[in-house]
Image (cartoon, helix red, strand yellow):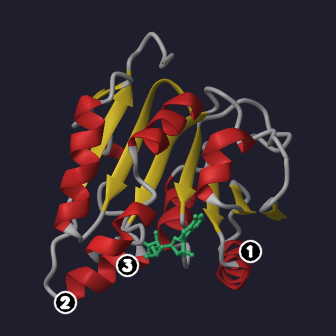
């Protein structure tokens, strides 16, 4: 099901009426390969796929239907609004930011999504012990995200945080790998007692 929540003051009920289950959020899901493969591997989890591109989301919705996936909800949402106030505290077990726009030019770098503030917003929506997973082919952006995570008081490294999703790749990741590029991934977990800043 596709929900349009851009430029609204909506606060989601992230389970969309389902009984409690682990919920994962793919921010900027694009063509949806990662979110849909995740949903297929884990039918007992709810997968939220969010993107600003409505046309892409409509295609992802059709693919989910064709594959008979009932544990997917698609959000036309702006990531900043989504993690800023549209998703309630402590409701997401794992959040993914995969191949976000890297804004490689110096003068555009301040358009990058992953900032200290963004990490704080992610910490707010994660359940205690929840995982933030990010990846990008753009090495300087990857290193910047790692630096933010290492300095952020809410997060600690979680090298085992991705074991269960080995082999699930995004469309962009496959594209970069086909060109011989490496796409490093990292995972950080909120402190088990919960992330309160
Ligand atoms: C480079 S693509 C990566 C797509 C996918 N994660 C992958 O790896 O194949 C970035 C995606 O993020 C989406 N996007 C960019 N800014 C966004 C924002 N502020 N909120 C939600 N989605 C955003 C774009 O529409 C695009 O689909």
- Residue 34 higher or lower than 186, as above or below: below
Looking at the image, is mark 3 or mark 1 nearer the viewer?
Answer: 3
Looking at marks 3 and 2 on the same chain, the residue that comes earlier in the sequence is marked by 3
Looking at marks 2 and 1 on the same chain, the residue that comes earlier in the sequence is marked by 1
- Residue 13 higher or lower than 134, as above or below: above
Residue beneath disc 3:
172
What is the C-alpha distance between the residues marked 2 and 1? 31 Å
Q: Position of residue 82 (x, y in %)?
A: 67, 49
Residue beneath disc 1:
65
Q: Residue at x 82, y 64 (%)?
A: 4
Q: Is residue 46 visible?
A: no
Q: Quadrant of residue 16?
A: top right
Q: Position of residue 111 (x, y in %)?
A: 45, 65
Residue beneath disc 2:
179
Helix, strand or loop at disc 1? helix
Q: Quadrant of residue 191?
A: top left
What is the C-alpha distance between the residues marked 3 and 1? 22 Å
Q: Is mark 3 within 8 Å of ligand 1?
A: yes
For mark 3, does the 10 Å Cα neighbourhood hold few (<14), some (14 to 19), or many (20 or more) residues?
A: some
Looking at the image, is mark 2 or mark 1 nearer the viewer?
Answer: 2
């Amino acid at each position: 099901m596709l929900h349009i929540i851009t430029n609204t003051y909506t606060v989601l009920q992230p389970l969309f009426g389902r009984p409690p289950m682990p919920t994962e959020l793919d921010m900027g899901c694009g063509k949806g390969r990662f979110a849909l493969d995740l949903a297929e591997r884990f039918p007992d989890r709810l997968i939220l796929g969010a993107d600003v591109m409505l046309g892409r989301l409509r295609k992802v919705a059709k693919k989910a239907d064709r594959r008979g996936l009932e544990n997917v909800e698609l959000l036309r949402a702006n990531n900043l609004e989504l993690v800023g106030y549209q998703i309630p505290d402590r409701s997401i077990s794992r959040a993914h930011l995969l191949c976000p726009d890297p804004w490689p030019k110096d003068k555009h770098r301040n358009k990058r999504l992953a900032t200290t503030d963004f990490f704080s917003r992610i910490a707010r929506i994660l359940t205690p012990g929840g995982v933030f997973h990010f990846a990008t082919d753009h090495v300087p952006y990857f290193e910047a995200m790692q630096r933010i995570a290492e300095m952020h008081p809410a997060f600690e490294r979680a090298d085992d945080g991705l074991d269960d999703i080995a082999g699930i790749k995004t469309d962009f990741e496959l594209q970069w790998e086909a060109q011989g590029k490496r796409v490093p991934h990292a995972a950080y977990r909120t402190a088990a007692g919960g992330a309160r800043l």
